[in-house]
Each structure stands twice: as structure tokens, then as C-alpha cells.
Amino acid sequence: MTSPTSPDLCHDPSLGARSGTGDTADLYWEDLVPGRRFDLGTTEIDGAEMLAFAQRYDPQWYHASEELAADSEYGELIASGFFTASLFMRAYVDGLLSRAAAAASPGVEELRWLAPVHAGDELSTELEVVDRAPSRAKPDCGTVTLRAVMTRLTAAGHSEPVLRIQFRGWFHRRG
């Protein structure tokens, strides 16, 4: 069932060939096979951006008060988990949705914050296709289950997972 506020994106032919950013798509449901991995790049945590996000959206003291955070078990500010999740979303848009014929997402199945994130950290993101299924209700679409891990990279060459997310997305099939 559709409504004016919830369009049936998989049945709108004008959207079928567009990527998540509105460009021409070159990745479709058929290309998203289980086991396929995508390197979504790296991002460095900007301290001012991290603090501004916390002050506006998640003003808990260990995210928003440098003075209080300095005396905490963390020794400094830590990023809001939702700030880290928003960085994942940007990496996902830039690294996959910008080229995929994506329709929408029915939601997140798992979101875990595995370790604190600090200003100056360099995070790398890898995405894996876990599963997929054609849609019985919408034959021009299919559902894809995706899992991503964001990992902190250290100067010593070590890495530590900081975020794990699993979610489903709807993607157009080649017509």
C-alpha cells in the first residue's frame, strides 16, 4: 500500500536508473551478491565537528564538555555514537549509494558501538553483502542485507573495530 508521503519507489520507472545521489546508476541488485565487499574509504575525525554535533544532538557531558571529559575514564571527549553512525552513512553514500540503483531502506537490524572514538582518529569502513532476495511484491526490486564495520587505524599498524551495523536496503533490478 502506498500513500503520498510513502511513494512506491520500486515501481516508479523514473527513479529506477538513478543512484542514491541522483546520478546514473551502474550497480543494481544483481551486482550485490553475498560475499561481495566494498571499501568505503577512510575518514579522519574532526574534533570541532565532533563537538558541534554533540552540543546540538547529544549533549551528554563526555561528548560535549571538554573539562568534565578530561577527568573521566576516557581522558578526553569521545564522539557520540550517532556522530560515528552519521560518518558511516556518509561513507556508505559516497562509496556505494552514489553508484547504486537504491530505492530506500526498511531499516537497521543491528547497530553496535564497539569502542570509543576520539578527535583525530582515522576510521576505515568496509561493507559486505550478507544476503539478498528478490521481492515477490515488487518484481523490479530486491532486498539486500548489508553489514559494515568501521575500524580505527593506528600509527602502529593496529586496527580496532569501533562500529558495526547491519541493515537492509531495497535496490532496483536491471529492467
Image: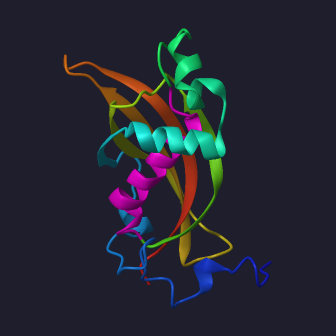
User: Residue at horizontal 19%, vertical 16%?
Assistant: 156
At a point 42% along the width and 73% down the height, the residue shown is: 21
Q: Looking at the image, is 38 positioned above or below residue 15?
A: above
Q: Is residue 93 magenta?
A: yes
The N terminus appears in which quarter of the rendering? Answer: bottom right
Q: Which residues are magenta?
A: 78-100
Q: Quadrant of the C terminus?
A: bottom left
Q: Is residue 14 or residue 30 the one in the foreground?
A: 14
The answer to whether residue 130 is visible is no
On screen, residue 26 versus residue 64, left or right, reads left
Q: Say which residue appears at 53% left-offset and 90% top-offset.
A: 13
How many labels sit on residues? 0
Q: Camera-side residue: 39 or 152?
A: 152
Task: Please name whichever residue, 72 or 33, is drawn nearer the observer in this view of the structure.
Answer: 72
Residue 144's x, y, as percent?
A: 52, 56
Q: Position of residue 23 (x, y in %)?
A: 37, 79
- The colouring scheme, among rainbow, by chain, secondary structure or one colour, is rainbow
Name above or below for residue 18 compared with residue 39: below
For the residue pair 173 and 85, the one nearer the viewer reads as 85
Q: For the point 42% across and 60% down, which residue is it?
A: 93
Q: Position of residue 77 (x, y in %)?
A: 50, 24
Indicate whether residue 155 is drawn in magenta: no
Res 90 seen here: yes
**As drawn, is 109 to the left or to the right of 75?**
right
Q: Is residue 33 left or right of residue 41?
A: right
The outermost residue toward the left is 156
